[in-house]
Amino acid sequence: MTHSLLHSTRPNSVLLLSPAAARQLYGERGLAEIAELTAMAPRLDPSNLDAQLGLLAKAEVLFTGWGCPPLDARVLAAAPRLKAIFFAGGTIRPWITPAVWERGIVVTGAHAANAIPVSEYTLAAILFSLKRGWHYIVRQQREGVFPAPLVASAGAYRSTIGIISLGAIGHLLCERLRAFDVNVIAFDPSTTVAMAARLGVTLVSLDELFSRSDVVSLHAPHLPQTEGLITGALLARMRPGATFINTARGAIVREDELAEVLLSRPDLTALLDVLIHEPPDPANPLLKLPNAIITPHIAGALGNECLRLGRLMIDEFKRWQCGEPLQCQITPEKAQLLA
């Protein structure tokens, strides 16, 4: 590993974020560190981008994140010296355009850091679901009485957890589940049996996963081939008292079919942190079903967790500056597989 500076000692940088997003993702300490490591131009506010494009003329490095405008050919034309983009966010899709790849600009993102809170949220949701906690809370609120169990809770011991997709989040979730006496099965066509075995996971078909699992947790990326992947027929195969968790993307699930299954199977619970439309249409039938628990896209980084994303990007910058391998570099091919 080399520690010599491959790039200029203090490359010119631009922070392309609103003031609020900059504080949220990097914090005052992180912003001060960027100012020390680089020759930082005044912050470029996305809300006034056109009037400030001149700030990009000398930029070699761009620090940005959620709320960044699309980095299209027009924006990049104003940044002829740009070499690297450090994106403090979980997904790059709305912001990194083909023009970035055409220029050969290095892109690194904080998807690995965002996977941590999602895996933590999901682990908590799985363990609570194995006690059927959501079911009893809703019944108590709706009926005003202490609810007796209608279906026996599985509990954690020797229960089966089904994970759909073993990407960054699914992989981390499997590692966290090792601490518990549960059986983990997974569906992921891109994962080999040997890779799954190293995680302590058994690969199965999607049908088998829904049939066997006490909790099914969805972590697949939203791609053309995964849109509508989770059908009503699959959901109807779930065991009595089972729970379906979605922290991935709403469009992977056929919401109308999910609503029909939940209506006909009151023993099932769906914990949905994402929906096709956010905020949802008030007419969405899932909002009215007692066994559909909906949270407002909170599984990813919130509060202090956001600082982890910015911290990772500063560390990545240091590696880039010294010519060391980047831990979270995103290539055009990898970008196609990210959520």
Image: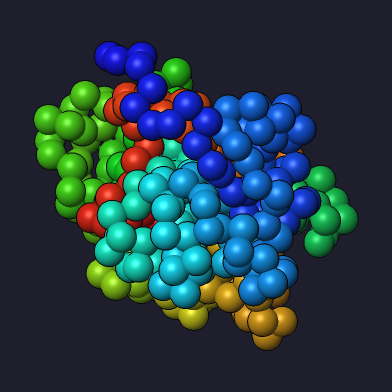
Of the 4 image quadrants, the one containing the N terminus is: top left
Residue 142 makes an appearance in the image: yes
> x, y (%) of residue 252?
40, 67
Q: Which residue is nearer to you in this view: 89 or 45?
A: 45
Q: Which residue is nearer to you in this view: 2 or 10?
A: 10
Scheme of colours in the image? rainbow
> x, y (%) of residue 196?
21, 33
Residue 130 makes an appearance in the image: no
What residue do we see at 67% from left, 66% from top?
Answer: 52
When asked about the image quadrant of residue 254, the answer is bottom left
Left or right placement of residue 131 versus residue 226 in this view: right
Of the 4 image quadrants, the one containing the C terminus is: bottom left
Left or right placement of residue 39 versus residue 227 in this view: right
When asked about the image quadrant of residue 221, the answer is bottom left
When asked about the image quadrant of residue 88, the answer is top right
Against 292, is 15 above or below?
Answer: above
Q: Which residue is nearer to you in this view: 73 or 301?
A: 73
What residue do we see at 70% from left, 60% from top?
Answer: 45
Left or right placement of residue 224 versus residue 272 in this view: left
What residue do we see at 64% from left, 74% from top?
Answer: 50
Against 267, is 225 above or below?
Answer: below
Q: Which residue is nearer to you in this view: 124 or 72?
A: 72
What residue do we see at 60% from left, 64% from top?
Answer: 54
